[in-house]
Image: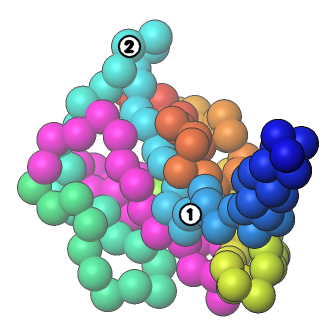
Amino acid sequence: MKFIRFISLFILLTGCLGQPDCLITTTNLVKIAFKSGNNIRIIAFDEIAVSGLDKVYYQDVEVSAVQLPVNPQVTEMTFTFTFEGREETLTIGYETSVQIISVDCGAFTNYGNLSVISSTFVDSQVLVNQLSTNATVNIQISVD
């Protein structure tokens, strides 16, 4: 009798494991951090413009990092940073792929192979080339 209870409990508990995990960690936000030398650099932005979007981001704020959207319909974006009486640009490239976890979870767009195509900053480097909610920084930019 105890064996039958154990088997029933086992089937009940393992039945939950057959359901897909709909936890999606991909994002359409690229995380950019600023530094000067080895130190974090806080910048007073006038604004940040994103190519193809009419919205202005980070207007009149002081931050050391930003999160800016990318467009799944294109493979590169240009960000224009206006601050401290100057204008700098950063153009990034990336690849998109649509992935399906299951019928219940649906589809999501994955952004990978992030690269810096061009930049007017002193130095720009990709630290994590996958856009993910788990990544703390995708691109680090040196600002004098």
Q: Which mark is residue 27?
A: 1
**Residue 4 image point, x, y percent:** 87, 51
Q: Secondary structure at mark 2?
A: strand
Nearer to us: label 1 or label 2: 1
Q: Badge 2: how crowded within 10 Å, few (<14), some, or many (20+)?
A: few
Which quarter of the rendered picture does the C terminus lie within?
top left
73 over 124 or under it: above or below: below
Secondary structure mostly seen in the magenta stretch:
strand
Task: Estimate the spatial distance between the alpha carbons at disc 1 and disc 2, rounded to whole Å.
Answer: 27 Å
124 over 38 or under it: above or below: below
63 over 132 or under it: above or below: above
Nearest the viewer among 127 and 28 is 28
Residue 14, quarter of the rendered image: bottom right
**Residue 6 image point, x, y percent:** 82, 44
Q: Amino acid at mark 2?
A: Asn
Q: Amino acid at mark 1?
A: Thr
Bounds of the magenta segment? 61-88
Q: Residue furthest front?
A: 1
Count of residue discs: 2
**Residue 37 image point, x, y percent:** 45, 13
Q: Badge 1: how crowded within 10 Å, few (<14), some, or many (20+)?
A: some
